[in-house]
Amino acid sequence: MSLDPVALQVTGGALRAACEEMGAVLIRAAHSSNIKERRDCSTALFDAAGAMVAQAEHIPVHLGAMPAAVAAVLAEDHAPGRSWVLNDPYRGGTHLPDITVITPVFERTDGGSLLGFAASRAHHADVGARVPGSMPADSRTLDEEGVVIAPRVLDEAAIDELVARMRGPRQRRADLRAQLAAGAVGVRRLQELAQRLGVDGLAAATAASLDYAERRARASLAALPDGTRYATDVLEAADGDLELRLAATVDGDRIVLDFTGSAAQHDGNLNCPLAVTRSACVFAVKVLTDPDLPASAGAHRPIEVVVPEGSLLHARSPAAVAAGNVETSSRVADLVLAAFGRALGQGTMNNLTLGNDTFAYYETVGGGQGASPDADGPSGVHVAMSNTRNTPVEALELEFPLRCTTYAVRRGSGGAGRHRGGDGVVREFEALEPMTASLITERRRHAPPGAAGGRAGAAGRTLLNGRELPAKWTGELAPGDRLRLETPGGGGHGTAGPEA
């Protein structure tokens, strides 16, 4: 079966709309501010072979890695209404707070042919680590980061068992049920498409959509000059910098991203599962080629990622990975963009967790984006692998024992150039009761570089009552303490004229 261009676009639009509807249900049904306010969640649909056929415009690091989660349950015994849950980074997850729920889609509610899978991934506010928020700055093994969920059936008994091991069990239960509800919407929409097109027609249409995405991706890559480009950068570990290396080779209509020579797996939590490294590469290639590429497995086919096992970017279990998903993924994307001469954005998610026995709060804070050859970089945005929103001050102060004393653009922090980098932000919190704080940040020792003569953006800073803290830090806050994040600005592009 071949689809004419109109039918192809209609089918692709229906699949994307189903993913967006799944996301809307998840956000509206969730209880935690992480999901309902920050929207730290993602949804996607997969075919019966586990290939991603569509995704909502959510979180790049979630979506690029989610195919590994579906692959982890592909061979299980599937039945209508039997959903699966996992967060194990070495069996399809990213880091432990990101819990994935996967629901198989059958032709009918009572069975029939397997059509595919509906999946969601959401960052839960706590998964039972020794620090509230489950993002410890100094973890060394996976078990220190919370409850590890190998792929298993998600039913009421499993929910009860899992949330009993986490802080805020009522909220965790509500968020897991919201993910199940999102999956149920995906099931209904795929079944409706199968009724319209037939089972074979739906399979042919999704296959045609994947092939279309591949053709567009290959055409975009073919427009880049052939050759190998190189880039190096570092991650700011507590005990010193960890170097990452990339050789990016464009060969006709394909690209090979080779990270051989990067730092070995280390005794901290900047390690990355391979799925996270791949997701960062997929994101960066899309940025470099065609941002409107259909987001599916077809667009990924021309991209080959080479990472030696046992390195920082292809870690072995049970290495800790809390920061790998958020910070190392950002640096991988930076490497690919830098290899092609792009000015870089803040390169960090500025992860902050605050909590005690009664609450857990997690926030990522936006910053400056790098300038492009024809425009200034935007200010105060979540860049690269994040794409979340912030927690509004009103919601923050209503739900948590915190006061936001400052929230402003960090003026002048973007790098100078013909086009300036975007400015970072300042976000300061006052603790209203005793709590534990954990920081996982980057670009504190090394500023985001510019390109083509543009200047670097300002490095980030974090201060506690005026005292500067290291990039990775865990400590206690007393009532009245103020924690201030000044996020990095983006690099500038091009040499500024004499009037600048």
Image (cartoon, rainbow, N blue to C red):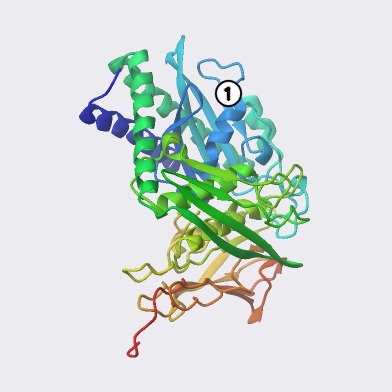
Front residue (pair 171, 347) = 347
Front residue (pair 77, 32) = 77
Up-down: is 39 above or below 191? Answer: below
Can you give x and y, in whole percent of width and height, for residue 93 in the image?
62, 39
Can you give x and y, in whole percent of width and height, for residue 68 in the image?
58, 35
Front residue (pair 469, 210) = 210
The quadrant of the picture occupied by the N terminus is top left
Can you give x and y, in whole percent of width and height, for residue 367 in the image?
47, 67
Give left or right: position of 193 versus 251.
left
Up-down: is 444 above or below 42? Answer: below
The residue under label 1 is which amino acid type?
Leu
Q: Can residue 107 be seen in this view?
A: yes
The quadrant of the picture occupied by the C terminus is bottom left
* Residue occupying the far bottom of the picture: 498
Up-down: is 433 above or below 224? Answer: below
Task: State the residue position of label 1.
Answer: 74
Residue at image position (26%, 33%) is 9
Residue at image position (34%, 26%) is 208
Front residue (pair 343, 444) = 343
Which quadrant of the figure has residue 108?
top left
How many numbered marks appear? 1
Can you give x and y, in whole percent of width and height, for residue 242 in the image?
70, 63
Q: Is residue 37 visible?
A: no
- Badge 1 crowding class, 10 Å Cα cut-off, few under 14, some 14 to 19, many 20 or more, is some
| Secondary structure at numbered mark 1 | loop
Which quadrant of the figure has residue 371?
bottom left
Give left or right: position of 496 versus 256.
left
